[in-house]
Image (cartoon, grey):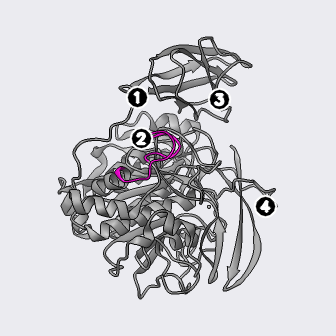
Amino acid sequence: MKKQFCSGSVFRGAAALSFFTLYAYSSFSYSTESALPSDITDSPSPKAARYLITFNETLTKDAPNTDLLLGPAKARSGSRPPRRELDEQKASQLLQVEGVQPLKTIRRQRLVAAELTDAQLQRLQGKADINRIEPDHVRYLMAQNIPYGYNLIQASQLSQSDTSARKVCVLDTGYQLGHPDLPDQNNGASGEANNSEVGQWYVDGYGHGTHVAGTIAAYDNFEGMVGVYPGVSIHAVKVFDNRGNWTYSSDLIEGLNQCRDAGANVINMSLGGAGSSLAEQNAFEDVAADGILLVASAGNDGTSTLNYPASYDSVMSVAAVNSQERRASFSQFNYQVEIAAPGVNVLSTVPTNEYASYSGTSMAAPHVAGAAALVWSFFPECGASEIRQALNLTAKDKGRTGRDPYFGYGIVQVADAYDYISTQGCEGDPEPIEEPGIEPIVGGVENITIRRNDWYRTSIDVPEGARSLVVTIQGGLGDADLYLNHLNQPSLSRYVCRPYNGGNEESCEIANPQPGTWHIGLYAYLFTRNVDLSWHIE
């Protein structure tokens, strides 16, 4: 896994002090455009045998009706049939027969997280009451002066005195209660821990969550800095401990449910990691269907690799730009990037009662979450998908015309989105954005098996006028590397693109690809099976 580094500065009042050199992993880490050496040791490797077990409806019971918690968002999206949830007692009994102890049970999604031996895994896969078993992926952290982003995204042009009109949930490292520039429990701040191991939600020993919250909600009070939607109601769900150590997909799924039950309208996730799962994807779709807008950071590796949850269709994937509106060198670029926001040297709140400048797509995401909440606060009759559409349609186009892998639709613009809904209404212009290019071509091959030190090869034809070619591999076991070459077969030394990541999560993205035949090669450094290959041309 690639390493990322973070630097920053902290000040109290007018005094400034350089203090922050931090090591973190992957896409829930902060990042800088010039990485600094780290003096912090690596976090421990996650356990390889932790899985997500999804049960069939045969092991469910009637769930309580929680629609009343959702308010206008649910009313706008429409009621759904009564749901059933996992019967925790029966599921536990089934697992105990195989000597399996549940680590986490998420009744709403019929999920149990547990550590399994190979033998237990094989036996459970044959159970009629179990739908599927998949890895429980690891998730990592991504990272009164007026921050440049406040003006860059037009937040300074819109003012909302009703701070309770919307609620933003922040899944992160916690929240510092008592910071003079942040709401407290008497003014719209609330929270909870995801589990007992992470500690109290109102103690943020790492600082990341408090920084993210400040970008969204810091007061306009002539002290420190100002957030996109000053004083907006915040619900903090602490999913990382006070050292910012990795968490799991199952923790994230449970955190989504906690945000939903707290009445959140927008959920910010300045976090992510490699590897997707159907259980996690379904959980995000379920929450989005309840009228909640989901925002996540695209990732900090500076590659075209897909990070999750940002790369699920139900989530807005946010790339980072600097104060000159240029793409940050660390920011991920891929076909799932939807919108961009400031993410370089972003000033915000940190414990204890201080301020610091951090960089990363972690800092970009809360600009979009705050923008969504601010615009939505004026139009509560709109649905989450309509707010998302307005933000995309009014984004400041950067890079090539229309949506592109580096900026998505462009840099979020608060005032323009407000004006758009004011004139067009919630549904907006039914005509889609005209984008040059071709009709999308999508294809792929599933469950590929490759012997060690051997190749799997195929090819695709790219027509004239294509703006983007994306080739991705993911899933399965082993270690395959993706190679892509134009006109000729790739080799270990001849290729146009080779991500060369560990495992089977790799992606190549070619902007304005040459027409003709592109050859794809998968080389297995270890015996590899059940790898999925996909391509997208547009």
Q: Which label's residue is closer to the chain start, 2 or 3?
A: 2
In the foreground, 100 or 25: 25
- What secondary structure is marked by label 1? loop
The image quadrant of residue 211 is bottom right
Alpha carbons under labels 2 and 1: distance apart: 10 Å
Magenta-tinted stretch: 393-409
The image quadrant of residue 175 is bottom right
The amino acid at mark 2 is Gly
- What secondary structure is marked by label 3? loop
What main secondary structure does the magenta stretch of the protein show? loop
Q: Give yes or no for contact between labels 2 and 1 (Cβ–Cβ under 8 Å).
A: yes
The quadrant of the rendering that contains the C terminus is top left
**Residue beneath label 3, please?**
479
In the foreground, 498 or 106: 498
Against 257, is 520 above or below?
above
Furthest residue in direction top, as rendered: 488
**Image coordinates for residue 503, horizontal then vertical, percent:** 63, 34
Q: Which label's residue is closer to the chain start, 4 or 3?
A: 4
Q: Magenta stretch: residue 316 in it?
A: no
- In this rendering, position of residue 315 left or right of residue 514: left
Disc on res. 111? none
Q: Which label's residue is closer to the chain start, 1 or 4?
A: 4
Q: Give yes or no for contact between labels 4 and 2 (Cβ–Cβ under 8 Å).
A: no
Disc on res. 437? 1
10 Å crowding of disc 2: few (<14), some (14-19), many (20+): some
**Residue beneath label 4, please?**
40
Q: Nearer the viewer, mark 2 or mark 3?
A: 2
The amino acid at mark 3 is Asp
Q: Magenta stretch: residue 404 in it?
A: yes
In the foreground, 454 or 298: 298
**Residue beneath label 2, please?**
402
